[in-house]
Amino acid sequence: QVHKVESGGGVVQAGGSLRLSCATSGRSTNYITAMGWYRQAPGKQRELVAAIIGGRVTNYADSVKGRFTISEDNAKKTVSLQMLNLKPEDTGVYYCNVRVGNTWSSNWGQGTQVTVSS
């Protein structure tokens, strides 16, 4: 099990920016092969926003390309999400997740709320 704690959410106006961070802990952190950020908007399913594989390869949802940047600190076992030019549709609870070996974790942290006002 990898324990995850997200932080950095808040309320911003459209066009603003936020930086989310996720700290991980647990014995399995040494075997993390990928990290990702997901979000869940009210009334919608959780969706993948960004992922970083092997510390180098990044994938983004089309809706955030060019605005969000995912990065990880392998030594600190943390993953961050820099969000620029935020839009009201970015509103939701943001969660981080990790892949240990070939398996994405099935347990989720509390997440961090992001609210973008128009």
Image (cartoon, helix red, strand yellow):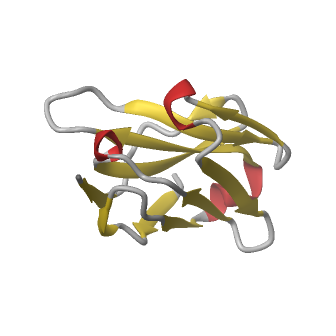
Foreground pick, 3 / 41: 41
Q: Is residue 110 visible?
A: no
Foreground pick, 112 / 76: 112
Q: Quadrant of residue 9?
A: bottom left
Percent coordinates x, y for residue 44 in the rendering = 22, 27
View extreme (left): residue: 43
Q: Tag count in the figure? A: 0
Judge from the rendering whether residue 12 lies leftward or rightward of residue 19; answer left or right: left
Q: Quadrant of residue 36?
A: top right
Identify which residue is drawn at 54% across, 57% down.
84
Q: Quadrant of residue 12?
A: bottom left
Identify which residue is drawn at 49% across, 32% down.
48
Foreground pick, 84 / 57: 84
Identify which residue is drawn at 28% across, 56% down.
116
Q: Is residue 34 visible?
A: yes
Question: Does 62 sit above or below residue 116?
Answer: above
Foreground pick, 51 / 69: 69
Identify which residue is drawn at 79% across, 64% down.
74
Percent coordinates x, y for residue 73 in the rendering = 75, 67
Percent coordinates x, y for residue 104 in the rendering = 56, 34
Judge from the rendering whether residue 96 lies leftward or rightward of residue 66; answer left or right: left
Judge from the rendering whether residue 97 lies leftward or rightward of residue 113; answer left or right: right
Percent coordinates x, y for residue 108 in the rendering = 37, 48
